[in-house]
């Protein structure tokens, strides 16, 4: 058994098989052979959540910076897509109270351009916030990013000629295929995976492990923190842009700072410092939040109303879950490990997750 | 602008600043001892406002008894929070404790939404506090008038406790050096509990005065004041009680002045605190009264 | 020729003077030591050299260039690397990762080409790995390559920390109590280890140490610090017989 798993050929075969199954499922869903609009929506949302959660994990789990600005960065990306991709003809109808800024009213960008622009703007804003804050103890980063998240919302509510204020922007063109969401997710997460496994990623981990030692080893703390924070914001912006096209509408209240807590739950559940764990948790939590919706509906069993079930219960359960996780299950699903075939087979064959070390090198 | 309006707004600014100061003390003390941003502090404040509603409107208690009960209940909640959400993680990585703090804050907000619904409730009208008094040409409510004095008195009390009592000495020792203090036989749990008792009772008093001023109670009412008061604590020098009060005053004043002099920017009043935070971190990260801390290498 | 020159350095924390008007010149290629009772200011001196603290007065020169005021990472880039009194490894990472991280400062690829695995970045990464393996091999740590750092025995952790400092391509190595917590036989092994790396990597070594046997055996020059002040310097024998040093360590009998 072990020989088979360690066989490189077999592992490649398993990987290809997995990819084919994955592609097949998406194609079947996309062509409406299986599933329905509701399931496709949840899956697309999960893909978006996976991008944003991995970006948050890059900053929090791999670099050790406590950032809570994901909702704000998403808002920037979402508004970039919303402002620039709505067809020019529709603009006047949307900005019917405060007319859109005359310059913006003439610009329409292709989706990809608006998406990338949103990412870059989010990264730029992140760098501007990071400059003063990242030089200091990272405690302040939590408050500064949380505050920034709120400021962005306040700004977007007030700059009516750009964002249409509290009314939001509707009629954002939708995407015809799930591949847009899953394709961008694969590219984004792939990029972050490559980054984390590069020399720069090792430097991030060094900062997480021990800032003083990292600096003594010649790592420029500020530069690397800004880098991680900026890349994290970029992909949160990308996630926000995708969310805008998925929902076809944006308004400031979608980006209330508590949205960030969803991603926080996801990375704690998946494991701070595990990409594969984060991806799994993204799907579990997103689907879970949808399923838990029935807690918010009044429930009647045999004609008796159960008084417990009413709006708000879902979020109570959600926050209790977050507390339980961090109190009793701090490493989440995977801790700092990554899912591999080795890991899966060890787990299936009942062996407790062995350290990967000691198998390769030790005599 | 008339000088009368200016004086009126000045009084408002001082009063709002004093309210911020009451909350900021709680942040600064907990941070000083645990190096933890107690994200749930603003939500403790929110719960205190609800406790007041129940004591007076539901249980029809006279206001002076209600205040005492509210303080006791809030303190109990604060201590429970520390025991259940922070104490188990004392040796965990700092990020875990921060996440727990966020979780606790989120839980309190969601619990309040679930139990009391998101619809704003009216804060009970405590006549003693809401009566308007004429002071020359100014007309102020009693609450506005007495808030600064209450805050200064409570600051005096807190400073007395931290400087003159045995438990206060222990608090200062723990905030200077947690590990050594522990080795010296200081009862860390007792010190931390005392910190939460002081912080929560000030939050309760703050909530009562706040409610008399802004009588609309909602599950998320503690979020913004909470964030702002942490910023006030940073502005004053985190860990420094008097600094927190000064920071609170400055923040409250700045906010009211923004509204008075630049009414077109009123929509940005909540954003201003964060601009102040960024400026402080750029110019003097240790805050107005904070000392420089050097890490041991 | 002196490689490191500490010129009239004073370091005050509030009212406390941790280091007072310190003058030290470490000669290139030598093993020299800084000793003194607890709290004499030795680690503070190291922290001033490596840029953790900015001295209140005075300057530090490395190869005749002023390095005062530079951040620790810039100083390491110049060629000074250090270890810590209480081992500071990247605990949850592998031995190999610990070494690779110390190579990061010499990386030429920017983060984008590194992430996108451009051919020149791949080549650099490969060279970095080969170099690190060679280093581990030379120091006898290669068999531990994939072990998690915190799982190593104490002595190996100390060794790894030295290896990590070497991986930065340092010329001057500052060792802060390398033998702390070691038993006599481990200390002896460390002594020969320090000699070997000095010769092999053409290093200058400046260390803080409490194990007098070790210090006396391998140091070519010893500086003695007491209450932040340099009270003696010289060879092992000179220092050993210095009256002020004996007083500093044993305390002076107070006559009434």
Image (tube, helix red, strand yellow):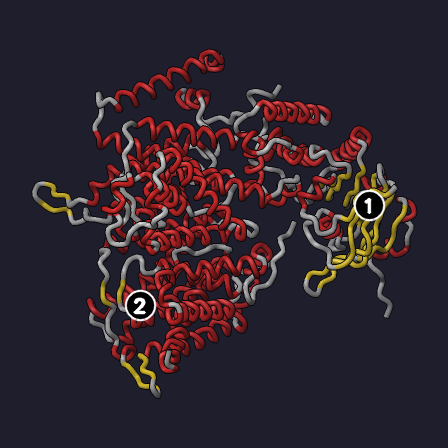
Quadrant in the rendering for residue C200: top right
Q: Is residue B133 left or right of residue C133?
A: left
Secondary structure type for disc 2: helix
In x, y percent, where is residue A355?
51, 27
Callout 2: residue from which chain? B
Which image quarter holds the N terminus of chain C? Answer: top right
Image position, residue C240 (x, y; %): 89, 48
Helix or strand or loop: what does disc 1 sit on?
loop
Q: Residues within 10 Å of mark 2 (few under 14, many from 20)?
A: many
Q: Nearer the viewer, residue A104 or B77?
A: A104
B93 displayed left or right of A213: left
Q: B2 or A344, which lies in front?
A: B2
- Residue B210 seen: yes
The quadrant of the image that shows the C terminus of chain C is: bottom right
Say whether marks 2 and 1 touch (CB < 8 Å): no
Q: CA distance from mark 2 to mark 1?
A: 69 Å
| Residue found 38% across the figure and 37% down from its top | A115
Neighbourhood count class around disc 1 (C-alpha, 10 Å): few under 14, some 14–19, many 20 upward? few
Return the residue at label 1. Answer: C64
Tell which subunit mark 1 falls on. Answer: C
The location of residue B114, given as percent across then percent down, is 24, 52
Please tell me in which quadrant of the rendered image residue A346 appears. Answer: top left
In the image, B227 versus C46, the foreground residue is B227
Q: Is residue B221 above or below residue A238?
A: below
Residue at the image point whose x is 82% and y is 45% from the top: C64
User: Residue B271, percent across and down?
Assistant: 40, 59
What residue would you read off at disc 2?
B70
Which label sits in the foreground, 2 or 1? 1
Of all residues, the one furthest to the bottom in this rendering is: B136
Q: How many marks?
A: 2
In this view, the residue farthest toward the left is A303
């Amino acid at each position: 058994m072990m020989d088979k798993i360690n066989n490189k050929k077999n592992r490649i075969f398993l990987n290809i098989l997995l990819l084919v199954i994955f592609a097949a499922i998406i194609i079947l869903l996309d062509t409406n052979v299986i599933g329905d609009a509701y399931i496709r929506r949840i899956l697309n949302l999960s893909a978006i959540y996976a991008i944003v959660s991995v970006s948050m994990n890059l900053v929090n789990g791999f670099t050790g910076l406590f950032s809570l600005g994901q909702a704000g960065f998403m808002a920037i990306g979402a508004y970039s897509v919303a402002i620039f991709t709505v067809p020019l003809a529709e603009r006047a109808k949307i900005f019917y109270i405060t007319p859109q800024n005359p310059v913006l009213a003439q610009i329409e960008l292709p989706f990809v351009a608006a998406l990338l622009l949103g990412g870059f703007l989010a990264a730029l804003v992140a760098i501007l916030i990071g400059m003063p804050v990242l030089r200091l103890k990272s405690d302040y980063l939590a408050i500064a990013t949380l505050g920034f998240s709120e400021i962005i919302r306040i700004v977007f509510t007030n700059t009516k000629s750009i964002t249409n204020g509290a009314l939001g922007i509707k009629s954002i063109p939708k995407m015809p295929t799930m591949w847009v969401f899953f394709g961008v997710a694969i590219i984004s997460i792939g990029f972050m995976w490559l980054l984390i496994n590069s020399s720069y990623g090792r430097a991030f981990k060094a900062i997480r492990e021990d800032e003083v030692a990292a600096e003594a080893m010649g790592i420029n703390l500020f530069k690397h923190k800004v880098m991680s924070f900026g890349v994290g914001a970029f992909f949160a912006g990308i996630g926000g842009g995708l969310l805008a096209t998925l929902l076809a509408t944006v308004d400031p209240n979608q980006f209330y700072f508590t949205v960030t807590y969803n991603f926080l739950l996801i990375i704690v559940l998946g494991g701070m410092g595990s990409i594969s764990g984060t991806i799994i948790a993204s799907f579990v939590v997103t689907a879970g939040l949808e399923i838990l919706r029935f807690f918010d509906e009044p429930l009647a069993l045999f004609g008796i109303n159960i008084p417990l079930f009413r709006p708000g219960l879902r979020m109570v359960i959600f926050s209790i879950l977050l507390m339980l996780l961090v109190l009793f299950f701090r490493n989440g699903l995977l801790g700092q490990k990554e899912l591999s075939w080795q890991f899966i087979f060890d787990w299936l064959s009942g062996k407790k997750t062995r350290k990967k070390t000691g198998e390769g090198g030790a005599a | 602008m008339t000088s009368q309006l200016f004086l009126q707004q000045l009084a408002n600014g001082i009063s709002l600043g004093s309210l911020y100061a009451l909350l900021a003390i709680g942040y600064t003390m907990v941070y000083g001892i645990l190096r933890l941003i107690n994200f749930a502090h603003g939500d403790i404040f929110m719960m205190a406002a609800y406790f007041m509603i129940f004591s007076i409107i539901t249980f029809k208690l006279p206001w002076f008894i209600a205040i005492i009960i509210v303080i006791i209940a809030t303190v109990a909640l604060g201590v429970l929070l520390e025991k259940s959400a922070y104490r188990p993680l004392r040796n965990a990585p700092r990020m875990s404790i921060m996440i727990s703090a966020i979780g606790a804050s989120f839980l309190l907000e969601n619990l309040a939404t679930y139990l009391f619904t998101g619809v704003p409730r009216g804060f009970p009208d405590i006549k003693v506090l809401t009566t308007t008094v004429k002071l020359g040409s100014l007309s102020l409510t009693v609450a506005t008038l007495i808030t600064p004095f209450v805050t200064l008195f409570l600051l005096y009390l807190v400073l007395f406790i931290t400087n003159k009592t045995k438990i206060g000495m222990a608090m200062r020792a723990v905030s200077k050096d947690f590990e050594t203090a522990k080795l010296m036989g200081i009862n860390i749990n007792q010190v931390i509990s005392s910190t939460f008792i002081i912080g929560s009772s000030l939050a309760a008093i703050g909530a009562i005065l706040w409610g008399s001023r802004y009588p609309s109670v909602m599950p998320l009412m503690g979020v913004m004041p909470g964030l702002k008061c942490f910023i006030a604590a940073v502005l004053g020098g985190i860990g420094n009680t008097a600094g927190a009060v000064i920071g609170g005053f400055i923040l409250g004043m700045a906010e009211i002045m923004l509204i008075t002099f630049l009414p077109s920017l009123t929509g940005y009043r909540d954003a201003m605190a964060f601009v102040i935070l960024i400026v402080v971190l750029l110019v003097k990260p240790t805050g107005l009264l904070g000392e420089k801390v050097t890490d041991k290498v | 020729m002196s490689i490191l020159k500490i010129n009239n350095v004073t370091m005050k924390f509030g009212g406390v003077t941790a280091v007072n008007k310190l003058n030290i010149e470490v000669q290139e290629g030598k093993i020299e030591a800084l000793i003194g009772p607890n709290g004499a200011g030795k680690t503070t001196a190291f922290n001033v050299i490596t840029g953790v603290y900015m001295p209140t007065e005075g300057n530090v020169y490395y190869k005749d260039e002023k390095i005062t005021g530079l951040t620790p990472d810039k100083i390491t880039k110049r060629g000074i690397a250090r270890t810590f009194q209480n081992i500071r490894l990247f605990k949850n990472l592998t031995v190999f990762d610990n070494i690779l991280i110390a190579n990061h400062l010499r990386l030429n690829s920017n983060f984008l080409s590194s992430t996108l695995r451009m051919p020149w970045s791949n080549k650099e990464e490969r060279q970095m790995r080969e170099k690190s393996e060679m280093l581990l091999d030379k120091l006898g740590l290669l068999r531990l390559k994939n072990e998690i750092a915190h799982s190593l025995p104490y002595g190996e952790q100390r060794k790894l920390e030295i290896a990590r400092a070497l991986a930065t391509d340092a010329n001057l190595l500052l060792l802060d109590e390398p033998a702390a917590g070691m038993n006599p036989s481990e200390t002896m092994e460390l002594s020969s280890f320090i000699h070997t790396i000095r010769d092999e990597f053409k290093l200058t070594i400046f260390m803080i140490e409490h194990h007098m046997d070790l210090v006396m055996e391998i140091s070519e020059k010893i500086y003695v610090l007491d209450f932040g002040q340099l009270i003696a310097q010289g060879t092992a024998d000179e220092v050993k017989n210095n009256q002020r040093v004996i007083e500093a360590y044993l305390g002076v009998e107070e006559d009434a």
